[in-house]
Image: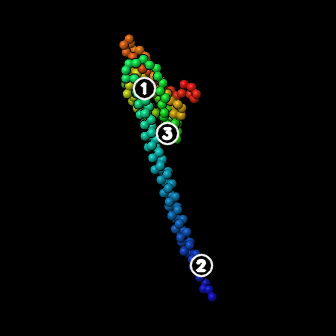
């Protein structure tokens, strides 16, 4: 003869372990959601800022090395590789020359990602242009005579269209 409740004795243990497991899974999912929602997005923004700075550093170096050390008359095109996207979005780089020198500015849809870099060229060298990130970028270097003895350069940044220059 069976006592009453004898066959349901293990149900409370299984129910307790199931509740423990559910609470553990709930805790892990909440911690994971907070981690991915806050920490990972902060990390991605920081990586985007660093990538923007490195992109401008590389472009500034390419511009500087495209200009010959000697006063040589030349016209040159240099193709530059830059990341197609930063923080999963396209961006734009603008080159501006002023009396203080040449500056590259990176503009990104995210407010947190922006960078500026001074290009180490002489004040007589003009750097200008505007480029989009997802196209082939070329540096066009052209000599120009300032006077009879001084040779300066114009550097123009532009996107090269597919299939041509």
x and y, in percent, of residue 106 in the image: 46, 33
Is label 2 in a helix, a strand or a loop?
helix
x and y, in percent, of residue 46 in the image: 44, 43
Bin the neighbour count of mark 3 within 10 Å (Cα to Cα): few under 14, some 14-19, many 20 and up.
Answer: many
* Residue at screen point 52% across, 41% down: 88
Is label 3 in a helix, a strand or a loop?
loop
**Left or right of 2, for residue 60:** left
Closer to viewer: mark 1 or mark 3: 1
Describe the colour scheme in one phrase: rainbow
Is label 1 in a helix, a strand or a loop?
helix
Mark 2 or mark 1, earlier in chain: 2
**Left or right of 88, for residue 100:** left
Q: Quadrant of the C terminus?
A: top right
Q: Residue furthest top?
A: 148
Cα distance between the residues tagged 1 and 3:
25 Å
Mark 1 or mark 3, earlier in chain: 1
* Residue at screen point 56% across, 72% down: 15
* Residue at screen point 53% across, 71% down: 16
Q: Mark 3 sits on what residue?
A: 86
Bin the neighbour count of mark 2 within 10 Å (Cα to Cα): few under 14, some 14-19, many 20 and up.
Answer: few
x and y, in percent, of residue 149 in the image: 36, 13
The label on residue 139 is: none
Q: Quadrant of the N terminus?
A: bottom right
Among the 4 quarters of the image, the one containing residue 120? top left
Residue 103 can be seen, yes or no: no
Bin the neighbour count of mark 1 within 10 Å (Cα to Cα): few under 14, some 14-19, many 20 and up.
Answer: some
The label on residue 66 is: 1
The label on residue 8 is: 2
Of residues 129 and 8, the one drawn nearer to the viewer in this rendering: 129
x and y, in percent, of residue 64 in the image: 40, 27
């Amino acid at each position: 003869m069976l006592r009453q409740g004898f066959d349901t004795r293990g149900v409370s243990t299984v129910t307790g372990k199931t509740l423990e497991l559910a609470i553990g899974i709930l805790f892990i999912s909440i911690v994971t959601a907070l981690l991915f929602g806050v920490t990972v997005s902060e990390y991605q923004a920081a990586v985007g800022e660093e990538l923007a700075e490195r992109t401008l550093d590389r472009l500034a170096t390419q511009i500087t090395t495209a200009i010959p050390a000697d006063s040589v008359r030349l016209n040159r095109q240099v193709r530059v590789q830059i990341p197609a996207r930063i923080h999963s979005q396209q961006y734009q780089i603008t080159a501006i020359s002023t009396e203080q020198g040449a500056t590259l500015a990176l503009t990104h849809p995210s407010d947190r990602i922006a960078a500026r870099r001074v290009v180490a060229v002489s004040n007589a060298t003009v750097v200008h242009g505007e480029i989009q990130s997802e196209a082939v970028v070329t540096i066009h270097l052209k000599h120009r005579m300032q006077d009879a003895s001084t040779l300066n350069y114009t550097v123009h940044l532009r996107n090269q269209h597919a299939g041509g220059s």
